[in-house]
Image (tube, rainbow, N blue to C red):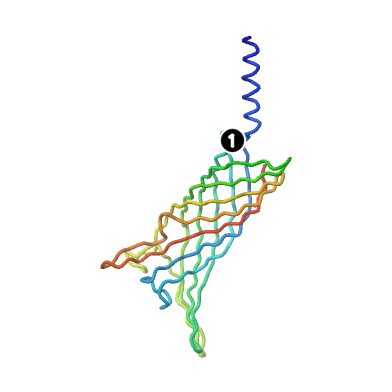
Amino acid sequence: MKKLILAAALFVAGATMAQAQDYNRVGVSYDHSNLGFNRNMDILDRGSETVGDNGFALNYTHGFGVAQNMFVEVGGNIDFLFGSKSISEYDEKLTYKHQNINLQVPVNYVYRFNITDGVSIDPYVGLNFKLHFANKFKLEYSDEDGTESSDWISVYDKDKMGKDDTWNRFQMGWHIGVGLNYEKYYLGVQFGTDFIPAYSETIDGDKYKVNTADVKITLGYTF
């Protein structure tokens, strides 16, 4: 009887491990980050508005098998983003340009639905920790006489932005997404927003705020 119980326990443990193996994934993604400026920010004299940054990221993910079809993913992504927004009136144009490089560390809970041999769908939800390395902007003014441009200004530069007007270098947020696995190839789509805004300040009772939302489409290889 003891041998039978031991054999059953080893069989169950082996089956669980086989169904919850760790994995690694590398990938490249198209990333879109939406900057939402509230009305008080007034960057182009148009009140509340948004600026969309587009770019790409290099992604690494490690998945820990915790139970049958359940995983916890921890990764690291380096994002390179660029965006601009312009307003035109008569022969004059004012353009706001933005650049951002950041490191993101996602932590996800994943549940895997096996569709057929080698094909599965992975819906997930998670938290995202974001550290900005570079985050800067400049303004360009164009008319019939030519174009004038300001220097690039870092939003973390206390001398140029003002001591109380620098942006947050660290942000934390949440996201939800789904991945499709075909053998070792992966396609994922993700949407999320940040709990900690890119910038938030109250001056004389007026709120100045920049919120961020992100979309990621990833192509990856799992090993």
Name the residue at 36% across, 71% down: 40
Location of residue 39 with respect to 130 vertically, above or below: below
Judge left or right: residue 28 versus residue 86: right
In this rendered view, identify the residue nearer to me: 17 or 115.
115
- The number of numbered discs placed on residues in the rendered structure image is 1
Name the residue at 60% across, 59% down: 30
Q: Amino acid at mark 1?
A: Gly
Name the residue at 30% across, 68% down: 206
Residue 202 position in % (x across, y down)? 30, 64
Q: State the image quarter where residue 210 is shown.
A: bottom left
Q: State the image quarter where residue 209 is shown.
A: bottom left
Residue 147 position in % (x across, y down)? 50, 83
Residue 67 position in % (x across, y down)? 58, 33
Read off the residue under disc 1: 65
The residue at the far top in this view is 1
Residue 200 position in % (x across, y down)? 36, 62
Judge left or right: residue 167 versus residue 223: left
Location of residue 117 with respect to 194 vertically, above or below: above
Q: Name the image quarter holding the C terminus.
A: top right
